[in-house]
Image: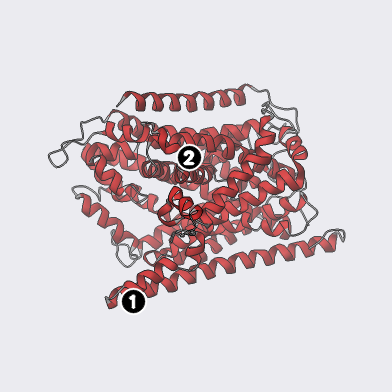
Amino acid sequence: MNTSALILMVLTQLSVIAITGYFFYRVFTTPPRPEPDSFSENDPE
Amino acid sequence: MSLKQTESWGTRVGLILAMAGNAVGLGNFLRFPVQAVNNGGGAFIIPYLVCFLLMGIPLLWIEWSMGRFGGRSNNHSTPFILDTMTKRSFWKYFGVFGIFTNIAVAAYYCYIESWTMSYVYHSIVGTFDGLSQTQVAQFFTSYVDIGVSTTGIPYEAVIFYILCLGLNTWILSRGLAGVEKAAKIGMPLLILFGVFLALRGLTLGTSGASAEVPTASAWDGLNFLWTPQFDSLSNPKVWLAAAGQIFFTLSVGMGTIHCYAAYVRSKDDIALNAVSAGFMNEFVEVVLGSLIVIPIAAGYLGLDWVKENAGFGMAFQTMPFLFEKWGPVLSAVAGVMWFGLLFFAGITSSLAMGTPWMGFMRDEFGWGRMKGALSFGAIVLLLGLPTVIFFQEGVFDEYDYWAGTVALVVFALAETVLFAWVFGMDKGWKELMSGSDLQVPTIYKFIIKYITPAMLLVVFLGALFTPANNEWTVAFQDLFSGNGWALDNSSIIKTIANTGLHQQLAAATDPAEVTRLTDRLFYTNMARMILVLTFAGLSALVYVAALRRMKSNPSTVA
């Protein structure tokens, strides 16, 4: 691959991967809201 | 007339995966690389990312906010979601697009999805073993000619279509839990399969060169996709193509996002969920989508072949032939992975298309999940069979153009104006930030109010008045020098008038060709009539629903 193509590809793909990863990290590490929330799987029996 | 909310998402991750599954579709793997190739390769990615930030993400936030706002009043489809946001009763009829588009798109989308099911089967049984490239391409042509059977099963394409639609209907009848489960299974598998094939595309290099194509190289494909060509940034055609791709890839302007978001409570986040799902779609498209079809095809057939033949059909007419070069076992595995990932991409989107209709019928007429799902399946079958039977006559393309392209832009433009200008940006911003886990930069207030609608308007006008040969610079020069604006046959105006077909008919001398074109004209108009009647029927249902609401609450307006 030529250098400019390689740079654009790597920069773009790493940016997309990093931003996606960051948002999912935020989703996984944010504590759930107190009940009742929108999600049924953490509802008390 | 709304019933108490009876459904909910199981988990936050399930909701995000379902939203991402809704967005990730066949276009991520087939449309994106082709658009990039046809629009200057590396020049395309910069406008594409700019449009994602200025149009895609704002539209995601708008639709999530509208959906959650409408859901608070137990509305789960766009007609009455839009109705809750304004006192003007006509907006609910714009909302009809949010059901119409889904039904009409599902009608032909399920057909493509059924091809992927069928091709998984053919990859496993080794149908493509030893076939030449021409024979693999011919196989597809035979497959969509429903009179020809490739397996011995009569009307094979119809059988697979009905099977695929049946599967969709069954999952939909399980409600949101079924949709969420499909996304939780489908999305990880899709990514797994995609990563495997992308790694192959990335490492293929020149090993695919042959005596017929000695210069073939996957690097050429990647070079072409990623070499920046900054001079193309001043070409409006590239920007319009990039904006169009952002539209289709995020599944905005359809009404599905509103429907999914309507099941989220006010105190729960939507801003972070929306960008998470949006960026997951970008990961699949930009990272995986760019590393499969183009490099693998260039690696075996050469870049010149790719430039000449890049198109949607490559997935079915070329990829099975290329996989055959990997040996009998790996080719079957690659075939299952490729068509499997397309299938998962397709089904997570087609399931989303069923939910607005089911939500509407439950809210307004009290229909249960089973009744809603069966009725959706029946309507889609009725609308879809013409696309299957008259595929060669252009019915499929007509649905795709009007329902899958034009309607999206019209609805997205209308909803953005409603959100930012009628409902009001301050109220809209408050809705977006309610319960938010993400501090959205306030510049987006300005972007949503001015930039996004302006971009949508440009996209719409660009489609309405596409200049001859899509040459915008020449068109503006002609206009300012007093020579008028010559429209291309692909513009909406010329498409409505069937100008291209009429020109072909006028030029045709062979009686067989005249008959073919006359038939095509007939089926084109028939397809449009079906779509118009569908829209009218749905509008009538919305009118009846509004009357029922008025009876139960006389202060509402039909």
Query: Which residue is located at x 37 percent, y 60 percent?
Result: B157
Tell me the number on the disc at residue B19. none
Q: Quadrant of the C terminus of chain B?
A: bottom right
Q: Amino acid at mark 2?
A: Gly
Looking at the picture, how far across and down is residue B334, in whole percent? 31, 39
Please tell me in which quadrant of the rendered image residue B540 appears.
bottom right
Query: Which residue is located at x 17 percent, y 40 percent?
Result: B213
- Apparent side of residue B323 relative to residue B357 in the rendered image (left or right): left
Query: Which residue is located at x 42 percent, y 57 percent?
Result: B468
Q: Which color scheme does this rendered protein use?
A: secondary structure
- Residue on which disc 1 sits: B515
- Residue on which disc 2 sits: B186
- Depth check: give the residue in front, B521 or B338: B521
What chain does mark 2 sit on?
B
Helix, strand or loop under label 2: helix
- Apparent side of residue B467 relative to residue B64 in the rendered image (left or right): left
In this rendering, is residue B453 above or below A40?
A: below
